[in-house]
Every structure is written in C-alpha cells, then in structure tokens.
C-alpha cells in the first residue's frame, strides 16, 4: 500500500520590508503652550485636518538640556488626530523618555516632501476640476473652512474675515482675500499664495506665517499679490510681491 505524502507546510507569516509615508514634526521648542498656540495659528479650529496620520517626531533641533514633557506632547498630538509612532534625534534623556512612551527610534529616517494623496475634503460649495485642483465658487463666510488635501485650491469668490482656506499645494484667490490662507500645509515649501486683493488676516506657507498685526506694505495691501517662501542661512521668511 503506497504511503501518503505529507502535505506541504505553509508558513503562517512572512517578514517583508515596507515603505510607509509618515508625517514628520520637527520640534523647535519644548514649550507646549507655545506649540499649541502656533498650531492653532496654522491649522485653526480644524478637527479633521489630519486623519490619524502616523507621525515621526524629530527632536534634532532641540538643545541638549531641553526639558520636554513627552507624555503631554504625545497627548496634544493625539488630540489633533495624529498617531506618534517614532522619534529621531534628541538628548539621551529625551530619547529615553520617548522610548519609555512607546516610540520607536528612527534616527535613519529622512524627512521628504509628502506626495499628494488622492483625497479631497470638499464642501457643498466646491467642485473638483482637472487636473485636480479644488474649486470653490461661492463666498466663504466667517467660520467656514475649506481644505484641499493633496492638491491646489482655487477660490473665485471673496474669502471674508474669519474664513479659512487651506491647501497642501498652491492657493489662488481671484477675489478679495480677507481671511486666513494656509498653503503648503503639509510642508511643501514651494507652494505659493496668489490673491487679486490681498487683505488677509493671516498667510502661511509650510508653517511660516504672518498675521495682520504686521501691516502689509502699500504696494501690496488691497492689490494683486503673490506670497512665497524664501529660505536661506538666516532662516525662512515670507516674501510678498505685487503681481503685474
């Protein structure tokens, strides 16, 4: 009688390498009150700007003697729908605290520009037109917010004071811009803001912002202008230039 051959063994798992894009937060202060304030200035009251994105916290720029409450920092980030998963750099004490909090060490991680995602946060007054810009053709009132996730934003009507327009790419406002405009929201330093009449409460590109507390020069206030980010060895600053 022939003997039955054994069935081939199938492994219960495999180990593979993977590439997973994450958001990188480069901390420049251990003052969590200041961090919360600046966060609100950049993202406003939006509760859905992030969608539980995995996060790498970069401590590299913090001084060696930094005293940071890691647990409080992680709670702040989670409150804003981020999922801290790893850390990079930092003092020995800070690295130990991060490890004890459950973060993985990722010193070899490189922060690169995040690729656009095929997701858009739209409103009833918005429509999508090729090649992917989010187009808003109705005035935005105080308290209204529009976020063009992973793409540019085009607004053809007034952005009133108290309204907020946000895009991962460029922002074009073919009308008075009197509210807040945040371009390059996820770190794209090449993003720009264009406005037919610039009277904004706040403008920001890749986290560098300017508020109306600093008056606009006469050659751009209430006129057609563009805003771009200038980076050099002295740091980052916003350049506001008239459009011909």
Image: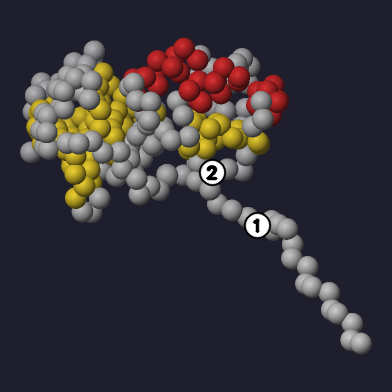
**Residue sitting farthest toward the front:** 1
Left/right placement of residue 72 relative to residue 114 reads: right
Residue beneath the point at 53% across and 32% down? 83
Q: What element carries label 1?
A: loop
Image x and y of residue 86, in percent: 60, 35
User: Which image quadrant: the C terminus?
Assistant: top left
Image x and y of residue 158, in percent: 11, 29
* Along the viewing direction, whichever of 117 and 110 lies nearer the viewer: 117
Left/right placement of residue 177 relative to residue 122 reads: left
Q: How crowded is mark 1: few (under 14 residues within 10 Å), some or many (20 or more)?
A: few
- Mark 2 and mark 1 lie on one chain; the one further toward the N terminus is 1
Say which of marks 2 and 1 sits in front: 1
User: Which image quadrant: the N terminus?
Assistant: bottom right
Residue beneath the point at 61% across and 43% down? 108
The circle on residue 16 is 1
* Along the viewing direction, whichever of 84 and 217 lies nearer the viewer: 84
Residue beneath the point at 68% across and 23% down? 97
Which residue does the numbered mark 2 point to in the structure image?
110
């Amino acid at each position: 009688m022939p003997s039955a051959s054994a069935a081939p063994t199938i492994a219960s798992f495999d180990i593979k390498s993977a590439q997973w894009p994450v958001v990188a937060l480069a901390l420049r202060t251990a003052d969590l009150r200041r961090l919360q304030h600046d966060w609100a200035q950049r993202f406003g009251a939006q509760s859905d700007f992030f969608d539980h994105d995995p996060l790498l916290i970069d401590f590299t720029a913090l001084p060696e003697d930094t005293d940071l409450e890691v647990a409080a920092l992680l709670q702040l980030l989670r409150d804003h729908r981020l999922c801290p998963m790893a850390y990079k750099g930092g003092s020995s004490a800070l690295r130990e605290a991060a490890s004890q909090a459950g973060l993985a060490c990722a010193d070899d991680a490189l922060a690169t520009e995040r690729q656009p995602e095929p997701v858009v946060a739209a409103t009833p007054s918005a429509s999508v037109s090729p090649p992917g810009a989010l187009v808003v053709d109705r005035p935005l009132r105080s308290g209204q917010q529009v976020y063009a996730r992973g793409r540019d934003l085009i607004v053809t009507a007034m952005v009133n004071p108290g309204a907020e327009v946000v895009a991962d790419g460029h922002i074009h406002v073919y009308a008075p811009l009197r509210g807040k405009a945040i371009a390059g929201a996820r770190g794209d330093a090449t993003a720009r803001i264009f406005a037919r009449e610039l009277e904004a409460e706040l403008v920001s590109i890749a986290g560098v912002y300017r508020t109306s507390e600093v008056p606009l020069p006469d050659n751009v206030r209430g006129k057609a202008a563009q805003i771009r980010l200038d980076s050099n060895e002295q740091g980052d600053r916003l350049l506001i230039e008239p459009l011909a």
